[in-house]
Image: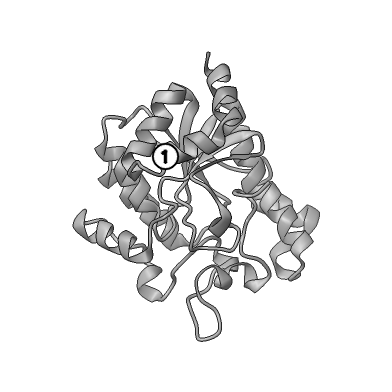
Amino acid sequence: MIKKKHEEVQSDLKEHNRKLQNMNSQEMLLWGYEKFDNEFAITTSFGIQSSVLLKMVSDSCLQKKIKIFWIDTGYLPSETYQYAEKLINDLSLEIEVLQSELSPARMESLYGKLWETNKSIDLDKYHEIRKIKPLENGLEKHNIQCWASGVRSSQTKNRNKMRFLDVIRDRLSLRPLLNWTKKDIFYYMKENKLPDHPLFLKGYSTVGDWHSSSPDGADKQGRDTRFRGVKQECGLHTN
């Protein structure tokens, strides 16, 4: 039954996107769960804006029902691990951690420090090992048909072309925060008394791994500060 619904939704993405654009973010999450039941999940990075989607799940009637996957590369800043621990406790979240089958030490021994070469092909390999494959393994394990994330259209050129619902690597990808602005994020966090990521207070508007994140500067801001400026996307949200 779930598989049929998955195929049905894919066959008419235009119509489903038309309906989704009239829903608020929490209604989109409810739509995802009602459509796919326990084969719907959300992903988080515990980055600068991650608390918004997590708060929506924790506040809704779907608390403890929607699976939450955290893609932990093993290279996150210590501030992110501390922030994750605080949000998990404050929001009473149940999180499944997804990690690479290769430890950081083993990967570096086999392939070197892939983020240091400033080559797009090496970053692609890094992201495949540490992010994309762990996510795909987790989605496959639970037969997830549709997964939601907190991507926003203003973050990258690729995301500016996204719809609320699309297909990524043969699964449906839902984006409840796609049309949110920085102001929307700011006021939602303030109204709901959500804590800021520690690195936000140090000038970071986005944060991923410790070796590939930088605070905003005069020459680079937002996603341009990631991956040494070589690329904006890590591959999770692209085909």
**Percent of width and height locating residue 181:** 38, 62
At label 1, the amino acid type is: Leu
Does residue 143 appear anywhere in the picture? Answer: no
- The answer to which image quadrant residue 124 occupies is bottom right
Which residue is at 45% across, 40% downward? 18
As drawn, is 173 to the left or to the right of 194? right
- Measured along the vertical axis of the image, is residue 49 above or below residue 89? below
Q: Residue furthest top?
A: 1
Name the residue carrying label 1: 20
Q: Secondary structure at mark 1?
A: helix
Q: Nearer the viewer, residue 164 or 72?
A: 164
Image position, residue 73 (x, y; %): 58, 51
Q: Position of residue 90 (x, y in %)?
A: 26, 46
**How many numbered circles are shown?**
1
Crowd around label 1: few <14 · some 14–19 · many ≥20 (10 Å): many
Residue 171, position in %: x, y? 60, 33
Seen at 63% across and 67% down, the residue is: 227
The residue shown at (27%, 58%) is: 189
